[in-house]
Amino acid sequence: MKIAIIGTGYVGLVSGTCFAESGNQVICVDIDTKKIERLKAGEIVIYEPGLEVLFQRNLKEGRLHFTNNLQQAVEQSDLVFLALPTPPGEDGSADLSYVLGVAEQIGKLLVEHKQYKVIINKSTVPVGTAEKVTAKIKENYIGEFDVVSNPEFLREGVAVEDFMKPDRVVIGSSSERAQKMMHQLYAPFVRQGNPIYYMDERSAEITKYAANSYLAMRITFMNELANLCEKVGADVETVRVGMGSDNRIGKRFLFPGIGYGGSCFPKDVQALVHTSSQYGYEYSILNAVMRVNDEQKLVLADKILDYFHGDLTGKKIAVWGLAFKPNTDDIREAPALYIIPKLIAAGATIVCYDPEGMPNTKQYFEREHPECIAHISYGDDVYEVLEGADALAICTEWTLFRTPDFSKLKSLLKSPVLFDGRNLFDIPQMKESGFYYNSIGRKTVHI
């Protein structure tokens, strides 16, 4: 099939590459000329395990193309995917200006082309967006076309696997013609029997928000439970195992930590709350989820401040992990971005290491917190940042961090003090190794 992907961000690039891998002709469009030139030259612009091999193969074999020319992409395609950003506004609403702006351009292009197209919302969009896109196209074009809602369910770090072998595919469309084309497109990806669900556009739009908001709620529940476990002397990890063995609950998304981040959970929860308020309904649970998550992101900083009696003047804190989760370079809403400024404000200097997230973190602090730049440095490896540090704080659960050389770690640190926001290590192991060890929802190990 002939496909256009408008937007070469995380969703657009993964989707376009994976569609090409199944034999389709794919044209990816972006207004960023420099990015398109890099992609044409074979330079991948995001970090996602497994994507590089597929990207290079399909670029070489001529199934994956990149352009700044929207007209060319629309004219040469039967299916046009909108994979555009929908950033949250100050009120939590999703900004649809990119989506509706492109929809207007498509309407103008269809006037000249006059051939049936299916326009697919791949972006995460609020209820009613398909209708808005349809109306925007109809401002200029009244011929045949359909708008479909096809939300993505990609997890950063395993996005290629999620796309190539999806748990389910959701198609929001009342058009049999569009449904038939979408079925043909996705059939190769569900050969193992996983379902394609067909529903109305509004139900498909809310399905994505509902799924992410529920998962965010599970994470937040566990974080609050962890805080309670610390107060009563229980171990949240054993509680988690006991809970997860109940098949009504399951084992996933029960790991406590220092809050959720990333590009999806924070903005999707905000957007669902905003949609609720527009319809006169207060989504009380999700309002609480947002409040608790904001507080949880600073729990590790508070633990460090308590240990040093509120004054970090002259203290050097090593930080392992900057990305919001492992196996990605995405730092959006990452807990580390909240923890670091609070530690610096208390007088600390910070030295960081992350396998993929350091370039984006440098840009973030230059843009958002220039006052912090002089107090942050970055190391070339996991041990370099420990030398002479008064404590180590772990913010991301990269596999690399799970099995360190504890004797080396202890020799490099000024004091064997470790604050673990992801519960990577066993309590008995830390006792035996001679560390002060403060984690989430468990008893603190004292030296």
Image (cartoon, rainbow, N blue to C red):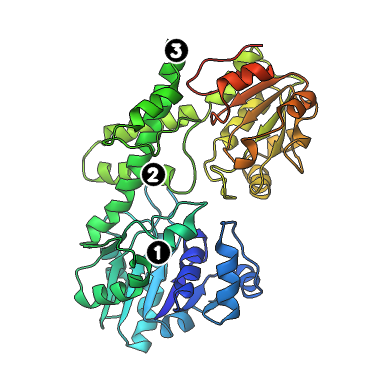
Identify the amino acid type marked 2.
Gly
- Which numbered disc flags the more N-terminal residue, 2 or 1? 2
Residue 422 sits above or below residue 86 on the image:
above
- The residue beneath circle 3 is 231
Q: CA distance from mark 1 to mark 3?
A: 47 Å
- Which numbered disc flags the more N-terminal residue, 1 or 3? 1
Residue 62 sits above or below residue 194 on the image:
below
Please tell me the numbered disc located at residue 10: none
- Which numbered disc flags the more N-terminal residue, 3 or 2? 2
Q: Residues within 10 Å of mark 1 (few under 14, many from 20)?
A: many
Asked if the residues shown at circle 3 and circle 2 are in contact, with their CB atoms under 8 angstroms apart, the answer is no
Residue 265 sits above or below residue 95 on the image:
above
Identify the amino acid type marked 1.
Val
Residue 97 sits above or below residue 324 on the image:
below
- Image location of residue 288, percent across then percent down: 34, 30
- Image location of residue 398, percent across then percent down: 59, 41
Q: Secondary structure at mark 3?
A: helix
Please identify, in this view, whether the residue under mark 3 or under mark 2 is nearer the observer.
Answer: 3
Nearer to us in this view, 250 or 357: 250
Identify the amino acid type marked 3.
Lys
- Image location of residue 302, percent across then percent down: 56, 20
Q: Secondary structure at mark 1?
A: helix
Q: Quadrant of residue 374?
A: top right
Q: Residues within 10 Å of mark 2 (few under 14, many from 20)?
A: some
Residue sitting at x 45%, y 19%? 235
Residue sitting at x 28%, y 52%? 207
Residue sitting at x 54%, y 42%? 324
Q: Secondary structure at mark 2?
A: loop
Q: CA distance from mark 2 to mark 1?
A: 17 Å
- The residue beneath circle 2 is 92
Q: CA distance from mark 3 to mark 2?
A: 33 Å
